[in-house]
Image (tube, rainbow, N blue to C red):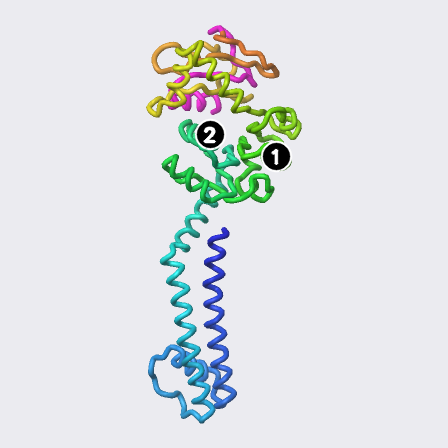
Amino acid sequence: MGKLAGVRDRLLFVFALLVACLATGTAGYHLIEGWSLFDSLYMTVITIGTVGYGETHPLSHGGRLFTMFMILGGIGLFTYGFTAITAIVVEGELAKAFRRMRMEQSIAHLTDHFIICGAGHTGGVICAELRKTGRDFVVVDRDPAAIATLSQRLGFDVLNIVGDGSDDAVLRSAGVTRAAGVFAVLATDQDNAFVVLSAKGLNPKTKVLACQKSLGVREKLMRSGADGVVDPEFIGGLRLASEMIRPVTVGFLDSMLRNKDSHFRFDEISVPSDSPVIGHPVGKIKGGEGGCPLVVAVVAAGSDDYELNPSVDRPVRAGDRLVILGETEALGGLRKRVLS
């Protein structure tokens, strides 16, 4: 609401000057000429408006001198007011303020969305993936130019908050109390640690992932409350080795993540206690032909072990996490069936 508040304050200042001028003129004519308040106000309005009407009543020498000052003041006031309003319109401040207000209203209605603290390259990659898989998200960054560059790179205006991602008020504005997860991908490990601490303090249930920038800080980030830490240098080295020794497998994964025409993704679904698929065999939703998503693995509730390629007869239980592979639209359909 900052931009809208700034425009509002400028308009209120112009309005206050106009009211002050009218009050001064009304009081002046009332005291100098002894006119009624209505006649004094009428004379003030036609004077500062320079409409050229005649005097309401004959003026004394003092009244005419006061009128000259009122005319000069009225011209100055209207010139300033017109210039201020024109500047607001021409510079697009009003349009920007209303666009900002609409964006903040959109953010206020989000639930189970994701917050990306950092509008750099890593943040942009996260935004693109969330967009492609149909997730809502908000970007938080101190630099409005970085957000503008990110929007231009992605080809759409991202919902955003300009501010410090470690600031509690900023995270609240981004809806952290309703968010499904937070990505801490700022430039330094210290900033990311503060984001983790703030996010977890405001919403202990939300999942927070941090980007590790230096060696040896993983444990510190985990102690700060992060649910997971990703080291881009480690991932990059592993990827280079995989590209060398298993290029076909890497090519398959690349076709999903990098190819703009590809809509295939790995995804996961947690089975709630009231899911209609509980008790049904995995084979009923496993797929294997046509465009059905594939259930690649199941992680049972309370376990971290993967049941790879689960049996078609295995019953689906509450709390199971299904690792699935398929076209994004089909994945969305399966998610609705499991969660509805």
Tell me where residue 256 appears, x and y as whole percent: 39, 20
Residue 20 magenta-highlighted: no
Magenta span of residues: 311-340
- Image quadrant where residue 194 sits: top right
Instruction: Examine the rendered structure and indicate whether residue 134 appears above or below residue 38.
Output: above
Q: x%, y% of residue 287?
A: 40, 12
Q: Residues within 10 Å of mark 2 (few under 14, many from 20)?
A: some
Please tell me whether residue 313 belongs to the stretch shown in magenta: yes
The spot of residue 306 in percent (x, y) is 54, 11
Residues 259 and 309: in front is 259
Whether residue 203 is visible here, answered yes or no, is: no
* Residue at the spot 47% in from the left edge and 35% down from the top edge: 120
Residue under label 1: 190
Label placed on residue 126 = 2
Q: Position of residue 186 (x, y in %)?
A: 54, 35
Task: State the residue in front, 243 or 209.
Answer: 243
Kindly identify the residue that appears in the image at 51 percent across and 20 percent down: 235
Regarding residue 247, the answer to whether it shows in the image is yes
Q: Residue at x 52, y 10 (%)?
A: 315
Q: Is residue 315 above or below residue 129?
A: above
Answer few, some or many: residues within 10 Å of disc 1's Cα (few below 14, many 20 plus, some between 14 and 19).
some
SS at badge 1? helix
The amino acid type of the residue labelled 1 equals: Gln
Amino acid bearing label 2:
Ile
Residue 172 vs residue 67, the one in the foreground: 67
